[in-house]
């Protein structure tokens, strides 16, 4: 395929790719939340069941920031 | 450009494009340009199928009211009890008044996600238009409810009285921003997870066309499909639990 499009479009695509690196940070955050939940749950299994909902809320908040980088990538791909 | 990309598409005709499953098409004739406000599309069809499945499960399933429940009745009862307990745990007794709305949200998103996993189906929740509507309704309901229930003292949600005084204006700014991005993250979390997961299944389906790696690709499809079945349920649960958390903030705004 011939090279076409302009420099601005290339910048938008590169930016979208760079923005999606931020989702890796969300992955680290979610891993931290679940890992700490699991290590706490193995120390005191009796208290684990009551904290599952809290874990999911924590996951959702950690994931929200990754979602913003995904949003930036989407905006660069389709809206700019 | 158009002629060249047509030629390229004809070469790759057999391969499956992973994003094709998300294209909205009119059901009866016409091309892409013909979609208006009231066109019946595949999104309409699958939203309707979702609602019919919910009715079949919840109305027909619990019609017998047997003491020893049938399979469909016990499924309905387990889902009902699960969400009822979650609402009571998070929002307290006075939040149970809003249980029907939260349960409606949960069962609709769950069934829409699960129906979207069927082969050749259309995942309605993978579109931000659908999830943003749900999230905006939650946001408006919660905000209005907060002001109706608490009056101006609902604003104490943004004024963290536990923090030292010089920090409070900065925290208030952060709290206001995080309050208004709630519908954004609430909707894109669901849509993004559904879109990405289903696209991954289709990417491996594209690999399965190539003969010598197709056994490995089919194994990968099975594994990812199992993971998706889990993600589909967890995302419905996460959407619902966040709705409960927002509702709790509206009912009891003090930190």
Image: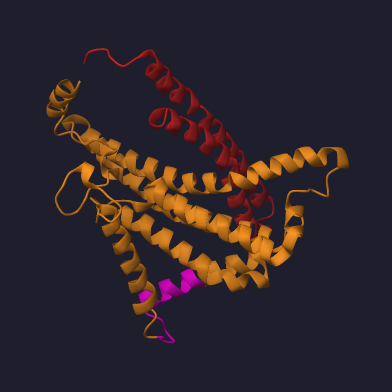
Q: Quadrant of residue B62?
A: bottom left
Q: Can residue B227 be seen by looking at this rendering?
A: no
Residue under the image location 33 percent in, 40 percent down: B199
The image shows residue B92 at horizontal and vertical percentages of 67, 68
Residue A20 relative to residue A32: left or right: left
**At 60% from the left edge and 73% from the top edge, which residue is drawn?**
B97
The residue depicted at 55 percent of the width and 41 percent of the height is A63
Q: Nearer the viewer, residue B244 or B143?
A: B143
Whether residue B69 appears in magenta in the rendering, the answer is: yes
Could you tell me how many numbered marks the image carries? 0
Chain B pictured colour = orange
In this figure, which colouring scheme has been used for the structure? by chain
B131 vs B192: above or below: below
Percent coordinates x, y for residue A58 in the rendering = 62, 47
Q: Which residues are magenta?
A: B65-80
- Residue B202 lies, with reference to residue B97, above or below; the image says above
Chain that appears red: A
């Amino acid at each position: 395929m011939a090279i076409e499009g302009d420099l601005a479009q290339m910048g938008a695509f590169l930016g979208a790719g760079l923005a999606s690196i931020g989702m890796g940070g969300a992955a680290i955050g979610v891993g931290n939340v679940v890992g700490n939940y699991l290590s706490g749950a193995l120390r005191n299994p009796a208290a684990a069941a009551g904290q599952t909902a809290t874990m999911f809320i924590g996951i959702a908040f950690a994931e929200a920031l990754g979602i913003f980088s995904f949003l930036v990538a989407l905006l660069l791909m389709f809206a700019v | 450009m158009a002629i060249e990309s047509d030629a390229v598409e004809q070469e790759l005709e057999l391969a499956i494009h992973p994003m094709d499953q998300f294209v909205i098409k009119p059901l009866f004739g016409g091309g892409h340009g013909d979609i208006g406000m009231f066109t019946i599309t595949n999104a309409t069809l699958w939203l309707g199928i979702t609602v019919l499945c919910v009715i079949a499960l919840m109305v027909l399933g619990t019609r017998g009211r047997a003491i020893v429940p049938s399979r469909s009745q016990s499924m309905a009862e387990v889902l009902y009890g699960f969400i009822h307990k979650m609402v009571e745990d998070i929002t307290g007794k006075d939040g149970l008044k809003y249980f029907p709305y939260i349960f409606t949200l949960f069962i609709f998103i769950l069934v829409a996600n699960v129906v979207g996993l069927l082969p050749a189906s259309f995942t309605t929740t993978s579109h931000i238009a659908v999830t943003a509507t749900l999230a905006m309704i939650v946001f408006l309901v919660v905000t209005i409810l907060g002001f109706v229930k608490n009056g101006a003292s609902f604003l104490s949600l943004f004024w963290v009285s536990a923090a030292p005084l010089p920090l409070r204006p900065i925290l208030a700014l952060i709290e206001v921003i995080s309050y208004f991005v709630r519908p954004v993250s609430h909707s894109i979390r669901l849509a993004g997870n559904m879109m990405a997961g289903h696209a991954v299944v289709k990417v491996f389906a594209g690999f399965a066309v190539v003969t010598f790696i197709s056994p490995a690709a089919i194994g990968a499809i099975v594994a990812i499909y199992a993971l998706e079945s889990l993600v589909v349920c967890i995302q419905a649960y996460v959407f619902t639990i966040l709705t409960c958390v927002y509702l709790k903030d509206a009912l009891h705004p003090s930190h």
